Every structure is written in structure tokens, then in C-alpha cells.
Image: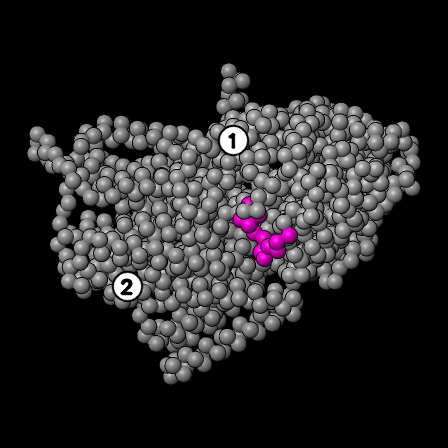
């Protein structure tokens, strides 16, 4: 136990014991322990999909753990944690997805606790405004209080969510990727506030991708991997490379960047493309067989650019060239038929139709190749499915089962299969390892490497810097809609790139 | 936002529409802007406004209800029968019984929707038929006319005789409507419960996270509609002086139309008290205008339908961004 | 993708069992219920409900609803009758009858496509769009008919309601043909595939390169055409048409879809099951008639049945998930 404050604490403030959570038979958390001391800054570390957010939702009563799990607050057993109960024991949360009310005003979102409660009462709007004003000025930002949250840009929305948590009088503050879209200056401000809160005895649970930052401000770190506890470590003496080894279960020391490749002809070219508020004057080119990485903060314009290449957004200015020919895409259907495929970052909502069958999902983008007169040929469709299931070694029972019965890794392969069935020249993979367990990640990148070898051009978008560093031939750093730098992994180190991205 | 002060697209458009209607109808018939006609518009609108503000609360919570109008008939029949059987009764008993029955019928909807996770439109289509079928079956379609005198005696709260001898009267329904509007506005804009209803309809996910009791919020929303149905039922009997079991059949569509016209959106997140009040007024003025101008009364519903279709398209985000784009282009072109 | 597997066969057998059971129950309650007359009357009434149910089925599978289905059928019938009566009164050459039917189909298609376009391009919920359209069409119908009805149609048009083809009543033949086409459309064409995918998740479908907007227009256009066919048959059978005719079919068609195991939020559902559900509901309707049940009591019963079917569905899901 680390004793960072002067008072000896006998009982941890919050304790989670033997927490397991299942979703439709899949274990998201498996016997995880967690304990939080008063006044400590405790980091929860792990890759995407390792169960950090799930653990937080258990702690705040959004998810129920299986009955053998226990939640204790100040040593007292909490029978049933609910969002209301969490508020009663003064746990405040900044959610990764923000959980704001888009049609309500900034001040109502921030002072939401004043609106809650089951006993009817008149809301004192003046009071709400002053609470919101105070919280925002603590953060040192100025956002119009009467504005509807839905009309704010993402980074301001994130600040509203932070202000909402600060406005609550809480003993525990949980921050799930609270700075994902904040600039360096804003993040510094946030770090300072977190320190101050901790000095006042408030405990902070901190979830972040930025390892340097994690090590800098937190006292202890709990590492999760694939829904299991790896261990709890003091941050003193911990290094970034050790932490990332713990998180991924791989030693990057043995891993090396890809071998330098010879130049080939350019397949895709983006010339001076801009979209108001999303990206600005982007120029890039992609060669045959090349794996190009996009990295940067949330909201840096990576996904928006990818959607433009995929025909789902139209650039305000600039042009796209495919094999030297001007490409004017009016829809993603046209993008697909010209040979551009896009694997969405959000597999649950956009990447796959979760309720429908594995077979339907795999053939969804290539129905044209299975036509027999006006009808779909059941046999051709079945052939497409079985050949890709074999090719990508997707583990399935029956192809007619719903795709949400598969593990994350197998779902992602099925999603890749859907795009490979369209025979693309350019494959864009947006956050391809989100919710994929560590073992399966390597095999997905092996598939990607093989595709590149066969001549396909690939773009990988990821906010996990090591992921693009080790799997791409070239990495572009995006920041506020612009390309800030170009890196060749052979010529730099992971930390160089991380420093560039996280500042 | 449930605020009078800040006008949204719907409220602004409706105010403009009403202004245009008034100008056109007045210039064609010259009888529109008389205190008598204006008051009669309020009289005719009052029940619909009482219903509409109740329905607004349900729509804001993300639900829908099409059974409330026939539920209102059930309330009237039950209350009237009760009054007759206890030999008269009085306002207090009638209001109490009306509200109780109204809230119960509305909670039946909410209960089925929440407990069995069924879409609200399907549940209320079903209860619409159940309520109406049973009402017609048990009453055999007969009306009640022998109502207690306290109920049917005209209560005129203010009256004024013009020089030509035409009486202008402020009647009970209008006063009750006024209170219903104020109360609903207070609920939605100024109480924590109302803001929770609004928040719940705005984002279910966020509502769950911050710990809004969802079942309770739903019951409050439907309960408020039930309350309005109960009050509306008593007032309507007073106004119509009779209870006709199928008199309100189909009224739900007029009210829904008005609410939608007022900017309320299915699925919550938008809609204001002022908007739905203006929505009802636009529809009533249309009807009254057609009368005054002497147009075919059969055109009324068609016009209302066309207006609503235009309204839902006009209020939609794709339309406004299209409009904005067009205006930008126009602006940069000239 | 819908394949006829074991589950489908089990479902069909289940429905047939329910049908037999009900058939026996009605015979016991009302001895002499089963007669050639009742079979014939069911065969004549069934298609109206059946076609309107198909018109409800396609939107429901896509995650929507078509609340305007009965009114749209009325409108198609009204326009057709208005044209026929205006043109020829009691007698009309075949070509005019054919033209009138085509006119009705076009009207159905056009209003359906209009609803689909609003849903697709303005992102408004189908409940709102079809409800608004329902109000508009009611008004349009009242305007055309002046609140009354149009009757006295050409005798060779009435043939569509009463005639037979090789012993099969024409309405029944039309319904069976429509069901088969609907099945092929939903199960075997890219558009049908898209409709199922849209029903589960429209945005993910769009990201997969499926033409979701075009599909939405076709969904409601197809629904509109089916309404038109139902409207033509209803007009022919009654030799008259008015607004609000067959209003109760709105509820029963929703009921038939859910009884036919269509997923209430879309994405799943088979024409075969819905077809059998329609048979069952027609049997219930005729059975209640045979028992001399009060019309209003039947209305309430349909409503209760709808709630019951949904609760049963809920219970079945609870049961199967707790067994896991």
C-alpha cells in the first residue's frame, strides 16, 4: 500500500472485489480487483477493450457484476450499486462518451445534479447558472452558458463534461479518457486541477492512453488486459516501456518496425483537400503495397478524412486522384466500386450489423457479384462466405448465427472479409484493434501485412501510437485537421512519435 | 426548450403563419378580427390545447399516445354515470373521479410500455381499440343527457356586449386551458421533474448514467397526460352539455397534428408549450377561416394534413442545412 | 439473408397447429361453423387483410411502420371509383377498367414513394411521416367524396371482387400471388436483403455500401402499391368506397405482423409466417362473426390480442435468455 498522504488509511475508500461482467456470454471482466485510497490518483491502464470502461461502469452502477463480486465503500458492503447510489456515496464521473444532453443548455448539463432528485421542487435557474459558471471558471474556459450542448464542437463538449463532474461535490472523481480531444494547454490545466483535487483529499481514477501523462501524475496504476487484472503497481520507478509491456503482454524490445520498402507507383493521391471544421489543406499520397498510418488526438480529423476518401463526406475543396485519374465520389457505393474500402472505427454501431448473421455481414458489400438475373444466387453467396471464412481463419459455428455471437477478433476478421470480398485497391482500417484481444491483434496485423505484400494499399488509423509505429511503413501525424508531420518508423523511435502526438 | 422567451424555428414560423392567416382571412371576410370570433376560436381550441400540452409531455419523454382521446370519452362516461348514480355530486367529486380514471388509463399504457418493452405506438394503437371497443360495447353507443345541473350550467367568468348586441363570453374551458398551459410550462421549464422528463427524452443513455429513474419519469409523463385528459373530460362535458361516447373519436389526430406542427418531435428532445399552443391555434384558425371565407368544409382536414407534412419536412435538420446552403450560395452569387 | 431452415419449418408447423386448434374450438363453440359458405366468405375477405398486412410487413421489417395503409387503400379506391363513375357510370369498356386500376396502382406507388422520400432524405421517423400522410389522405378523401361515398361501379370491374379464375376467387389468387412475389422480393433480391439489414441498423448498412435511401423509397412505394391492390379489391367487392372503410384493418395488420413473428424493431420476419398469421386472424374474425360477437367487443378483443401477442413475445425472450 502506498502512503502518499500523512493520514494512515486503514480502509480503502472504494474497493471492488472479484468483479466479473458478462455480455451475451462473453466475459468482459473476469475476477478483477480494484481498490482506491482516499486522496490518491489511481490510473487504470490497458489497451482498448481491456475492460477499463466496463470496470468504471461497474463502479458507478451502470453495469451489474455477477453475484460473486462485491463493492465496498469505506469498508461497507454496497448491496446494489446504481447510478443513484454512486451519486449518494459521492462518486462523480467524466464518461468517455461524455453522456451529455445535446438539446439542453450548457449550464443545465453542468449543474445536472440540481435537476435530479425524486421530490418535486422548483429549479433555481440562477443557482444553476452560477454553479456552471464556477465550474467553468475553475477550468479556466469560457463557454456560453445558454448554448445547447449539441451545437458545440467536440472539445468544448468534453470541457462541459469535465465541468459537470467538477460541479458535483464528490469524493471520487472518475475520468475516462477525459482529455482525449483536448489540446496540450487544456490538458495541462486539467492535470493541475487533478493535482489540486487530490491534495484536498479527493480520489481520482484516471484512464488515459497517454502513458507519459499517466506516469507523471498518478500514484498507483492498475493494469488490465483482456478483462483480467495484470497487477497493481506504484508509479514510482515504473517506465513507459514497462507499462506498455504490462498492458499489451508483448515486449516491444523484441519488436521492430517494418523493413524499409522500395517506392512503387502512387495509387491514391489527396491534393489540398479541406472540409470546414474537420480538416484543412491535406495533401498525401499512398503507394501500391504501402501501409500508411494516421495518428493523432480524437477530433484531429483522421476519421473525417477517411470518410471523405470513402465517399461519405464531400470535400469543400481539393481533389482526390486514384491511379492518376480524378475521383469524384458522390457516395460510398461509388467509392467501393472504384476500389476503396473503409473499416469503421465503431464496429458495434457502424462496422457490422450486429443482430444480423455472419453470412449477411460478410456479403453485404459484394452483392453485385452474386446476381443471377434479378435474384441473388444463394450458392454464390454461400461460396463467398465460406471462402473468406477459410481464408481469414474466422472461427464460426454456423454462418447463419448472429455476428454478435463472435468474439471481437473474429468479428473484426469478418468485417475485413466483407471488404476483401469487394476486391479493393485501397483498404482503410479505422482503429482495427478496438475491442480485439491482444492475441488476435497480432494476427490481424499479419493479415494486413500479407494484403500489402499482395499489392493492396492500406491506411491504418489509430490513436495507439505503438500500433501504427510497428505496423506501418510510414506514419502521418494529424493535429487539428492538418498533417503535422511525416515519420518513417525506421528513422525514429516510438517515443519520438509519442512525444510528437501527445506533446 | 420549455421557455416562452426564446423562440425556436417552429414558434417563429407559426407566429408568422398566424399573422398571415389573420391578414388574409380578415381581408377576405372582414369578420375575423371581432372579439366574438376570437373568443370563439379560444373556446373551440381549449380542449385541444389541454390535450396537446399533456401529449407534449409524453412526446418529450420519447413516447407517443394515440389512445388519449377515446380515454377521455371513457373518463366522461364513467364520471357522468357516477354522478348520476350518486344523485348529482359536485365539481370536486367529478374532477377527482375524472382525474383518477384519466391517470389510471394513461398509466395502463405506460405500464405495458415499460414492463414489457413494447413500442409506445403499438401499445396505444391496441389500447385505443380496447378503450373504444369496450366503451361502445358497454354503453351501446347511447349518450347521456340528464347531467346534473351544476355541471351543465354555463359558467361565464366575464362577458361583454358589443354595441351591436353581440355577446362575448369568457367561459370555463378557456380559463382551465389557461391554467393547464401555465402548469405544464412550469412543470417542464421550472421543476426538476420536468427537466428530468426532458433530459430522458433527449438522451436515454445520459439519463441512465446520471441516475434518472426511468420508470418513474415515464409514469410522470404519462400521468400528466392522464391528468390533462381527466380535466379535459370534465370541462368538455360542461361545454358540450352531454356525453356522447364517440364524440372524441379521431380527436387524437387533430391534437397530434397540432403538437407536431408546434415543433414537438417523436423521440423527444424538442418541442415547447408555446409551440403546441400555437400549433392548435393555427389549426383552429384555419378551420374558422375556411368557414368565414365560405370554402368547402371538406377541404379542412386535407389542408391540415398538407401543412403538417410541410412542417415535419421544414423543421427537419436536413432541410434547414439545405436551406442554409442554398442561402449561402445565393448570398455569394449576388 | 433469410433461409428456410429448421426454425422456419418449426414455425410453420406451430402456426398450422394453432390454426387447427382454433378451427376445432370454433366448431365446438358453434356447431356447423365449418361450411362451404364460411370457407368461401373467408376466401373473399382474407385477401384484403392479407394485402394490407403485407403492406405493413415490409415497413416493419425495415424498422418503420405504415400507419397510412388503410387510408391509402381507401384513397386508391376512391380515385379509381371517381374515375370509373365519372367516365362510364354502370358500364365501362375493359380498357377503361384496366386504365382505372393502373391509375389506382400509380396513386399508391406515388404516395408510398413520397412517404419513403421524406423518411429517407429528411430523416423523419416513419411513424410521424405515415401519421401525417394518413391525416392528409383522410382529408383528401373527404374532399373528393364530400364526406360521402362513391358507388355504382361498372359490372366488369366488380368482377375483380367476385369473379373466379379456375375456381379460385380472384382476390384470393391476387393475394397468393402477391405473397409469393413479396417472398421472392424479400428473400432473394438485393433490395430485400437491404431491407432486412436496414431494419437492424440503418447506419451500419449505409457504411456497408448498401443503398439505404433508395431502399427506403422502395419500401414505402412497395407498401403503397400493396395498399392500392387492397383498395382495388375492396372497392370491387363492396361496389362502393368511402374514407375510413376498413379502418379496423390497421390494427389487425399490425397484429398479424407481430403474430407472424416479425421483429417489432425490424430486421427479421418471414412472409410465410405472416401469411399463416393472416389465415389465423381471418379464422378468428370469421369465428367471432359466426358466434354473433358484438362488433365493438371484437374491436376491443383485437386490441387485447395485440397486447397479448407482444407480452407473449416478451415472455418467450425472457424464458430463452434465462435458460442460457
The picture places residue B145, in percent across and down from the top left corner, at 16, 58
Disc 2 crowd rating (10 Å Cα; few below 14, some 14-19, many 20+) is many
Q: Which residue is mark 1?
A: A132
Badge 2 marks a residue whose secondary structure is helix
Q: Nearer the viewer, residue B88 or A401?
A: B88
- Residue at 52% x, 60% y is C178
Q: Which residue is mark 2?
A: B136
Q: Nearer the viewer, residue A196 or A124?
A: A196
Kindly indicate whether the residues beneath marks 2 and 1 are on one polypeptide chain: no
- Residue at 21% x, 32% y is B32
The picture places residue A111, in percent across and down from the top left corner, at 50, 36
Q: Quadrant of residue A194?
A: top right
Q: Which residue, as the protein is rendered here, is positioned at the far top?
A: B334
- Numbered label tally: 2
Q: Quadrant of residue B167?
A: top left
* Chain ID at mark 1: A
| B193 drawn magenta | no
Amino acid at each position: 500500500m502506498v502512503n502518499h498522504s500523512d493520514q494512515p488509511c486503514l480502509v480503502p475508500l472504494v474497493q471492488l472485489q472479484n468483479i466479473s461482467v458478462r455480455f451475451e456470454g462473453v466475459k468482459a471482466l473476469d475476477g478483477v480487483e480494484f481498490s482506491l485510497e482516499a486522496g490518491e490518483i489511481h490510473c487504470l491502464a490497458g489497451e482498448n477493450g481491456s475492460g477499463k470502461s466496463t470496470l468504471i461502469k461497474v463502479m458507478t452502477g451502470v453495469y451489474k457484476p455477477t453475484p460473486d463480486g462485491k463493492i465496498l465503500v469505506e469498508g461497507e458492503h454496497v448491496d446494489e450499486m446504481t447510478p443513484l447510489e454512486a451519486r449518494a456515496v459521492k462518486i462523480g464521473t467524466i464518461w468517455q462518451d461524455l453522456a451529455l444532453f445535446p438539446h439542453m443548455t450548457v449550464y443545465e448539463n453542468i449543474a445536472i445534479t440540481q435537476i435530479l432528485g425524486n421530490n418535486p421542487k422548483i429549479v433555481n435557474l440562477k443557482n444553476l447558472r452560477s454553479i456552471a459558471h464556477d465550474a467553468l471558471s475553475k477550468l479556466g474556459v469560457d463557454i456560453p452558458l445558454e448554448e445547447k450542448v449539441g451545437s458545440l464542437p467536440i472539445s468544448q463538449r468534453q470541457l462541459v463534461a469535465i465541468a459537470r463532474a467538477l460541479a458535483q461535490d464528490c469524493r471520487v472523481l472518475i475520468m475516462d479518457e477525459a482529455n482525449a480531444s483536448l489540446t496540450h494547454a487544456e490538458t495541462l490545466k486539467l492535470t493541475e486541477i487533478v493535482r489540486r483535487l487530490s491534495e484536498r483529499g479527493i480520489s481520482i481514477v484516471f484512464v488515459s492512453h497517454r502513458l507519459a501523462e499517466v506516469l507523471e501524475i498518478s500514484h498507483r496504476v492498475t493494469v488490465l488486459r483482456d478483462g483480467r487484472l495484470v497487477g497493481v503497481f506504484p508509479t514510482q520507478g515504473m517506465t513507459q516501456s514497462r507499462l506498455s509491456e504490462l498492458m499489451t503482454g508483448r515486449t516491444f524490445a523484441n519488436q521492430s518496425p517494418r523493413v524499409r520498402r522500395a517506392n512503387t507507383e502512387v495509387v491514391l493521391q489527396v491534393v489540398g483537400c479541406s472540409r470546414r471544421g474537420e480538416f484543412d489543406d491535406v495533401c498525401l499520397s499512398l503507394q501500391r503495397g504501402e501501409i500508411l498510418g494516421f495518428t493523432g488526438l480524437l477530433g484531429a480529423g483522421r476519421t473525417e478524412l477517411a470518410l471523405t476518401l470513402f465517399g461519405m463526406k464531400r470535400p469543400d475543396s481539393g481533389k482526390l486522384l486514384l491511379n492518376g485519374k480524378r475521383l469524384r465520389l458522390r457516395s460510398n457505393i461509388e467509392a467501393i466500386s472504384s476500389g476503396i474500402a473503409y473499416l469503421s472505427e465503431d464496429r458495434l454501431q457502424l462496422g457490422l450489423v450486429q443482430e444480423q448473421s455472419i453470412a449477411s455481414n460478410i456479403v453485404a458489400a459484394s452483392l453485385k457479384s452474386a446476381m443471377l438475373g434479378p435474384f441473388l444466387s444463394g450458392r454464390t453467396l454461400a461460396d463467398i462466405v465460406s471462402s473468406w471464412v477459410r481464408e481469414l481463419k474466422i472461427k464460426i459455428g454456423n454462418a447463419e448465427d448472429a455476428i454478435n455471437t463472435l468474439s471481437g477478433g473474429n468479428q473484426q476478421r469478418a468485417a475485413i472479409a466483407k471488404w476483401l470480398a469487394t476486391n479493393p485497391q485501397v483498404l482503410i482500417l479505422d482503429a482495427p484493434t478496438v475491442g480485439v484481444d491482444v492475441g488476435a491483434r497480432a494476427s490481424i496485423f499479419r493479415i494486413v501485412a500479407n494484403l500489402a505484400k499482395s499489392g493492396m494499399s492500406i491506411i491504418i488509423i489509430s490513436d495507439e501510437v505503438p500500433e501504427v509505429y510497428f505496423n506501418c511503413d510510414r506514419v502521418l501525424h494529424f493535429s487539428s485537421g492538418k498533417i503535422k508531420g511525416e515519420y518513417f518508423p525506421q528513422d525514429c523511435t516510438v517515443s519520438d512519435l509519442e512525444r510528437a502526438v501527445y506533446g | 426548450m420549455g421557455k416562452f422567451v426564446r423562440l425556436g424555428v417552429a414558434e417563429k414560423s407559426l407566429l408568422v403563419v398566424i399573422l398571415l392567416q389573420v391578414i388574409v382571412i380578415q381581408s377576405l371576410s372582414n369578420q375575423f378580427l371581432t372579439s366574438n370570433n376570437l373568443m370563439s376560436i379560444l373556446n373551440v381550441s381549449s380542449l385541444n390545447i389541454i390535450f396537446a400540452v399533456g401529449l407534449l409531455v409524453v412526446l418529450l419523454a420519447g413516447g407517443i399516445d394515440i389512445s388519449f382521446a377515446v380515454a377521455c370519452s371513457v373518463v366522461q362516461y364513467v364520471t357522468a354515470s357516477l354522478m348520476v348514480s350518486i344523485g348529482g355530486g359536485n365539481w370536486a367529486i367529478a374532477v377527482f373521479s375524472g382525474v383518477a380514471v384519466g391517470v389510471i388509463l394513461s398509466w395502463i399504457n405506460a405500464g405495458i410500455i415499460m414492463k414489457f418493452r413494447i413500442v409506445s405506438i403499438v401499445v396505444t394503437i391496441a389500447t385505443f381499440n380496447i378503450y373504444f371497443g369496450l366503451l361502445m360495447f358497454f354503453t351501446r353507443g347511447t349518450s347521456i343527457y340528464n347531467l346534473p345541473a351544476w355541471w351543465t350550467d354555463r359558467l361565464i367568468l366575464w362577458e361583454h356586449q358589443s354595441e351591436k348586441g353581440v355577446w362575448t363570453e369568457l367561459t370555463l374551458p378557456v380559463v382551465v386551458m389557461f391554467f393547464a398551459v401555465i402548469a405544464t410550462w412550469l412543470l417542464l421549464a421550472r421543476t426538476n421533474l420536468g427537466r428530468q422528463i426532458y433530459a430522458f427524452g433527449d438522451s436515454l443513455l445520459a439519463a441512465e448514467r446520471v441516475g434518472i429513474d426511468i420508470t418513474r419519469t415515464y409514469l410522470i409523463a404519462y400521468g400528466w397526460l392522464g391528468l390533462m385528459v381527466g380535466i379535459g373530460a370534465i370541462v368538455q362535458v360542461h361545454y358540450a352539455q352531454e356525453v356522447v361516447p364517440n364524440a372524441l373519436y379521431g380527436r387524437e389526430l387533430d391534437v397530434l397534428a397540432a403538437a407536431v406542427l408546434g415543433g414537438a418531435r417523436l423521440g423527444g428532445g424538442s418541442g415547447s408549450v408555446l409551440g403546441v399552443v400555437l400549433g392548435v391555434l393555427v389549426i383552429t384558425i384555419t378551420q374558422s377561416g375556411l368557414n368565414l371565407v365560405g370554402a368547402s368544409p371538406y377541404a379542412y382536414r386535407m389542408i391540415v394534413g398538407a401543412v403538417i407534412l410541410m412542417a415535419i419536412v421544414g423543421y427537419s435538420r436536413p432541410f434547414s442545412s439545405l436551406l442554409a446552403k442554398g442561402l449561402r450560395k445565393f448570398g455569394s452569387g449576388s | 439473408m433469410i433461409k428456410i431452415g429448421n426454425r422456419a419449418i418449426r414455425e410453420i408447423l406451430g402456426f398450422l397447429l394453432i390454426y387447427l386448434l382454433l378451427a376445432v374450438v370454433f366448431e365446438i363453440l358453434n356447431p356447423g361453423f365449418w361450411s362451404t359458405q364460411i370457407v368461401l366468405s373467408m376466401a373473399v375477405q382474407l385477401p384484403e387483410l392479407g394485402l394490407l398486412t403485407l403492406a405493413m410487413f415490409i415497413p416493419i421489417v425495415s424498422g418503420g411502420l405504415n400507419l397510412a395503409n388503410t387510408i391509402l387503400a381507401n384513397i386508391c379506391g376512391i380515385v379509381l371509383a371517381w374515375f370509373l363513375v365519372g367516365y362510364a357510370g354502370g358500364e365501362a369498356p375493359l380498357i377503361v377498367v384496366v386504365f382505372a386500376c393502373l391509375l389506382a396502382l400509380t396513386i399508391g406507388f406515388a404516395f408510398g414513394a413520397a412517404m419513403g422520400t421524406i423518411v429517407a432524405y429528411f430523416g423523419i421517423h416513419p411513424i410521424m411521416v405515415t401519421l401525417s400522410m394518413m391525416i392528409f389522405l383522410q382529408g383528401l378523401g373527404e374532399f373528393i367524396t364530400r364526406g360521402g361515398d362513391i358507388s355504382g361501379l361498372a359490372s366488369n370491374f366488380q368482377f375483380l371482387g367476385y369473379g373466379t379464375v379456375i375456381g379460385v376467387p380472384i382476390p384470393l389468387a391476387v393475394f397468393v400471388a402477391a405473397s409469393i412475389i413479396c417472398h421472392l422480393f424479400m428473400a432473394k433480391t438485393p433490395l430485400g436483403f437491404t431491407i432486412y439489414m436496414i431494419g437492424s441498423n440503418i447506419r451500419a448498412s449505409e457504411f456497408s455500401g448498401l443503398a439505404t435511401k433508395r431502399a427506403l423509397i422502395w419500401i414505402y412505394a412497395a407498401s403503397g402499391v400493396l395498399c392500392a391492390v387492397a383498395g382495388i379489391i375492396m372497392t370491387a367487392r363492396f361496389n362502393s368506397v368511402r374514407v375510413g372503410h376498413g379502418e379496423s384493418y390497421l390494427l389487425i395488420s399490425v397484429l398479424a405482423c407481430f403474430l407472424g413473428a416479425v421483429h417489432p424493431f425490424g430486421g427479421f420476419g418471414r412472409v410465410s409466417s405472416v401469411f399463416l398469421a393472416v389465415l389465423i386472424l381471418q379464422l378468428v374474425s370469421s369465428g367471432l362473426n359466426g358466434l354473433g360477437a358484438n362488433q365493438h367487443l371484437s374491436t376491443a378483443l383485437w386490441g387485447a390480442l395485440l397486447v397479448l401477442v407482444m407480452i407473449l413475445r416478451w415472455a418467450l425472450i425472457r424464458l430463452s435468455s434465462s435458460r442460457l
